[in-house]
Image (tube, grey):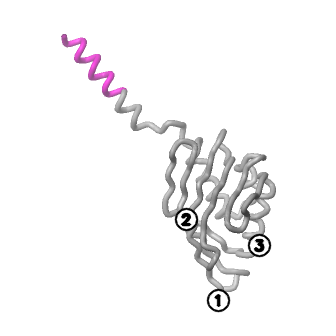
Amino acid sequence: MKKKQTFALTGLLCLIASLSLPAQPLGHGALATVQQKFTAFNRHDAEAIERLYAPDATLHSPDYPNLSGNRPIADTYRKVFAMIPDARDDIASLERVGNHVYAQFVMTGHLGGAQDKPISVRLMSVYTIGNDRIVGDDTYYDRKM
């Protein structure tokens, strides 16, 4: 009887330990991919952003309803960095469900770098991740600043 209890307890402890471990190694997976995208954005690193999006990725947003391809997507970020040289994204929440990551964040900066033209835009993005790359980006925001 003692062996069965020990085995059951050991099995239970293994189950509990497996539940507390991340499903994928740290630095990989859907959340890590999206976190890398935000880090690249805050560095104004459009090349890194291009590498994080799959070659056939799509982006849907109020300003870009049907953008396809990692290069055109990275070019939109280049335009943002040119228009808002101090652009920064601050994440409010980041949640993963399956291969989707839901991000709420605020982009701040100054239009044209002018201190008298501050902007603050609340955004919500739904990223679809495949093979540690962004394959879909559906971003929502109010175009009024």
Locate residue 11 relative to residue 21 in the image: left or right.
Answer: left
Locate residue 36 relative to residue 58 in the image: left or right.
Answer: left
Q: Tell me, yes or no, whether the two marked residues, 2 and 1, touch with CB atoms within 8 Å.
A: no
Q: Dot 2 lies on which element? A: strand
Circle 1: is it few (<14), some (14-19), or many (20+) Cα within 10 Å?
A: few
* Mark positioned earlier in the residue sequence (1 or 3): 3
Circle 3: is it few (<14), some (14-19), or many (20+) Cα within 10 Å?
A: some
- Mark on residue 116? 1
Q: Nearer the viewer, residue 130 or 46?
A: 130
* Mark positioned earlier in the residue sequence (2 or 1): 2
Q: Dot 3 lies on which element? A: helix
Q: Which residue is mark 2?
A: 105
Task: Report the magenta residues as a range.
Answer: 1-14
Separation (CA) of disc 2 from disc 1: 23 Å
Q: Residue at x 62, y 59 (%)?
A: 38
**Relative height, residue 34 to residue 99 (above, below):** below
Quadrant location of the N terminus?
top left
Amino acid type assigned to the residue bearing label 2 in the image: Phe
Locate residue 40 relative to residue 56 in the image: left or right.
Answer: left
- Residue 61, position in %: x, y? 67, 63
Q: Which residue is mark 3?
A: 82
* Mark positioned earlier in the residue sequence (3 or 2): 3
**Relative height, residue 38 to residue 14 (above, below):** below
Circle 2: is it few (<14), some (14-19), or many (20+) Cα within 10 Å?
A: some
